[in-house]
Image (cartoon, helix red, strand yellow):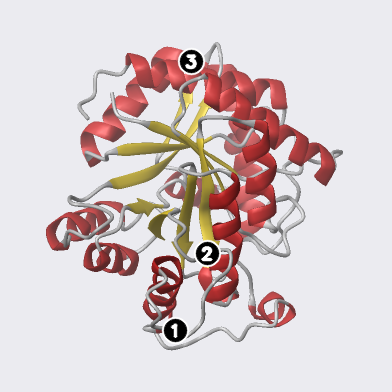
Amino acid sequence: MIPYSLLDLVPVVEGGSVRQALTNAAGMARHAEANGYHRYWVAEHHGMDGIASSATAVVIAHVGAATSTIRIGAGGIMLPNHAPLVIAEQFGTLDALFPGRVDLGLGRAPGSDQRVARAIRRTLESDPQAFPRDVLELQSYFADDGQTGIRATPGAGAKPELWILGSSTFGAQLAAMLGLPYAFASHFAPDALDQALAIYRRDFRPSAQLDRPYAMAGFNVFAADTDEEAEFLASSQQQAFVALRTGNPRQLPPPVAGYRDSLPPPQAAILDHVLQCSAVGSPATVERGIAAFVERTKVDELMIVSSIYDVEARTKSVAIAAEAMRGATVAA
């Protein structure tokens, strides 16, 4: 059995609040820890009413204090939004608070638009080499090698586990060149998954952090007692994706029976394509879906995503996914 982890978008549901979303996040992290999940990650998003993890390092500290053994981290920090020194300080602080448990996944997408980027006081860089330079600068702060002429405090000597994230082949190439683990966002951007994994494995160069390629991929799981119930629960995320793709992001809505079948064929096809890396159904259905995905991709770890409106239903889905991982006969 390969390790399995949980990506939590810290959803703010319709009729809910940010405070409740953060309370749920701590509870979900404890639940993931009790069910054998290896990591619990949150992601940086800005200007979105339905996601409460914009202050990502603060949320990580919140869930770190609520847990004791599970790895905690960012999947990820959108580095174009930040000076590398600030991220070194934030994650140096987290590493001091939770030694040996902190992951730092780095992405090159801004996680926002130009308007939000200006509000963050950052100018989106058009140079494709800006992201690799920022990653190297960040590594230098953690290594405390003096190359920047500035010592990060906290940060110098900290050892968060660095990851490169991606939804295209660019991140795969960079992760391979730097000898870092690689996580692909196939839970919402599946098109380049197979090509990116092949490039990463082919071009990987060993590093001080990692001696062989280590790849993880995102996979949606909506699990319930029956296939019909799971399809119903999945409709919340389906509605959210359609709203996002049509320029109307919203809080996570309640599920709607028959939602996908109500869509015009072009929209239904787009939704099916975007969410193709998913297992929706009963425990047996989910186990088969997970086993097939891992067999196809040969990933070293699976990052499960389970955005469900009702927190009790989501808690159950996360537990079913863990049991499915234990039951799937897949090779590490």
Looking at the image, which residue is at 60% across and 71% down? 86
Residue 22: quadrant of the picture: top right
Taking 258 as reference, is 132 left or right?
A: left
Amino acid on which disc 3 is placed: Ser
Residue 122: quadrant of the picture: bottom right
Precedes in sequence: disc 3 or disc 1: 1
Instruction: Identify the residue position indicated by label 1 in the image.
Output: 148
Of labels 3 and 1, the one closer to you = 1
Q: CA distance from mark 2 to mark 3?
A: 45 Å
Looking at the image, which residue is at 56% across and 83% down? 124
Instruction: Identify the residue position indicated by label 2 in the image.
Output: 155
Q: Are marks 1 and 2 in contact (CB under 8 Å)?
A: no
Looking at the image, which residue is at 27% across and 33% down? 294
Q: Nearer the viewer, residue 252 or 45?
A: 45
Examine the rendering and report whether any part of residue 138 can be seen: yes
Q: Nearer the viewer, residue 198 or 100?
A: 100
Q: CA distance from mark 3 to mark 1?
A: 53 Å
Q: Position of residue 99 (x, y in %)?
A: 51, 44
Location of the N terminus by quadrant is: top left
Mark 3 nearby-residue class (10 Å; few <14, some 14–19, many ≥20): many
Q: CA distance from mark 1 to mark 2?
A: 13 Å
